[in-house]
Amino acid sequence: MRTGYDVELVHLTKRYGDTVAVRDLNHVFAKGHYVCLLGPSGCGKSSTLRMIAGHEEVSDGSILLDGQDISALPPAQRGTAMMFQNYALFPHLSVRDNVAFSLRMKGVEKTARHAKADELLSLVDMTHLADRSPAQLSGGQQQRVALARALVTEPKVLLLDEPLSALDPFLRIRMRSELKKLQRELGITFIHVTHGQDEALALADEIVVMNDAVIEQAGPAREVWTRPRTEFVARFIGGHNVIALPDGKATLRADAVTLGTEGMPATVTAVEYQGASVALTARTETGEDVLALLPEGEFFASPKSPGEAVRLSWTEGRMHRLEA
């Protein structure tokens, strides 16, 4: 039994009838890390999170928290807290009473639970709005309240189900930096479900990439980005080309591809300006599409348009062989 970790999944499986949503997961979430479960819709990441929370029954296997099997415990007794995608705030309660609600259910008297709620509202910079109703708050403010409510029980692990998906892009970027800052201050494990690669890369100490009910790859964010193990991870994480070799496949990061007078002949099929860089897609004579991410100054020094002939080149050492 491991006791140096917060959460361990042991042969964790979830079936809905004949459908296997999560298949035999074995993984350890290190204590105090920000972990992102990343993958496309239907890959099993939300079912995994909900089983850890106790909102879905485990079909097979177990979930350990600090070495104790919590699989059969009700959510309130697990030492975890869940922040839902839609925030699920009570419209008839004030911000303070929303945050204090779980303490009220535990029988904590009013003065004590309000004091604790105010402490958490201060942590998320919402003290000045404690007496308002949820309807009087912006999306970002509602998210802060939901976060304070989840943290009021002092969980060992905070579970977040796509918490940023309802926010506009600008606020999403701001809130993810606040989430990361808060996690570092609290020092507890955050397990955050997302389908956004940028979000996972920005937040995670560890990324767990799921596909078709299993874990395809898990590791530090930079490792997953720079050294994807499988074709699925390379394509899903983005920014990678998958190149066919005589004896297998390799990945090549888009920022390793350059244009010049020598190299592989290709025809430009798309050009997308992205501010600091330009994404250029070109089709080779063998029909492969290759993405080049070029610094915008370099591209506009010799701009290209769809239909133009180019030559693609890269250093062989920049290629990373994929597992079969």
Image (tube, rainbow, N blue to C red):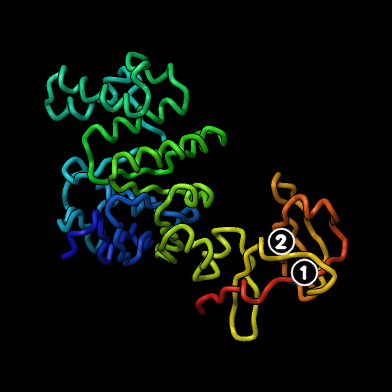
Front one among 14 and 76: 76
Tally of numbered discs: 2
Q: Is residue 71 left or right of residue 245?
A: left
Asked if disc 2 and disc 1 are in contact, CB closer than 8 Å, the reply is yes
Q: Residue at point 88% right, 61% down?
A: 308
The residue that disc 2 covers is 292
Q: Secondary structure at mark 2?
A: strand
Name the outermost residue toward the bottom: 247
Q: Earlier in the sequence, mark 2 or mark 1?
A: 2
Q: Please state which amino acid type lies under the numbered disc 1.
A: Leu
The image shows residue 193, relative to residue 243, as above or below, that is above
Residue extending farthest to the top is: 131
Q: Three-letter amino acid code at disc 2? A: Ala
Q: Quadrant of the N terminus?
A: bottom left
Res 76 quadrant in image: top left
Q: Which residue is mark 1?
A: 312
